[in-house]
Amino acid sequence: MKMMKKAAGAMRSFWRSESGLGTLEIILIIAVVIIIALLFKDWIIDLIENLMGKADEQADQIFN
């Protein structure tokens, strides 16, 4: 039991000592998201067009 309390205390102190994300980490995350978006650009556009087409069809059914 004492060992678990020590581990929990160590985890708390670790989280408190972290100062947060730095600018470099934010830039790297944004770069990775942009690269993924560029790699899957065609697939994302096709998916959105497909979803919008389905929404348009259903809207036509409701209002006609």
Image: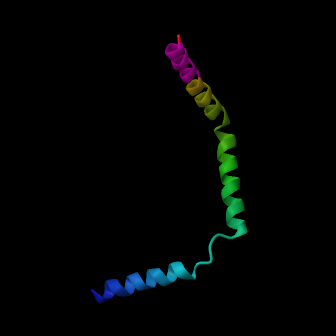
Q: Nearer the viewer, residue 39 or 54?
A: 54
Query: Where is 61 relative to 20, above or below?
Result: above
Residue at point 62%, 73% (across, down): 20
- 61 with respect to 34 (left or right): left
Q: How is the image coloured?
A: rainbow
- 2 with respect to 34 (left or right): left
Which residue in the rendered view is the most extreme toward the front?
Answer: 63
Picture coordinates of residue 62, whole percent (x, y): 50, 16
Query: Could you say which quadrant of the image residue 44 lies in?
Result: top right
Which residue in the rendered view is the most extreme toward the left?
Answer: 1
Query: Where is 8 relative to 50, above or below?
Result: below
Which residue in the rendered view is the most extreme toward the top?
Answer: 64
Picture coordinates of residue 48, whole percent (x, y): 61, 30
- Secondary structure mostly seen in the magenta stretch: helix
- 6 with respect to 28 (left or right): left
Query: Where is 31 relative to 7, above or below?
Result: above
Residue at point 59%, 25% (across, down): 52
Q: Nearer the viewer, residue 28 or 54?
A: 54
Residue at point 69%, 47% (across, down): 35
Residue at point 51%, 81% (across, down): 14
Picture coordinates of residue 17, whole percent (x, y): 57, 82
Q: Which residues are magenta?
A: 53-63
Query: Where is 12 relative to 41, above or below?
Result: below
Picture coordinates of residue 4, whole percent (x, y): 32, 83
In magenta segment, residue 57? yes
Q: How many marks?
A: 0
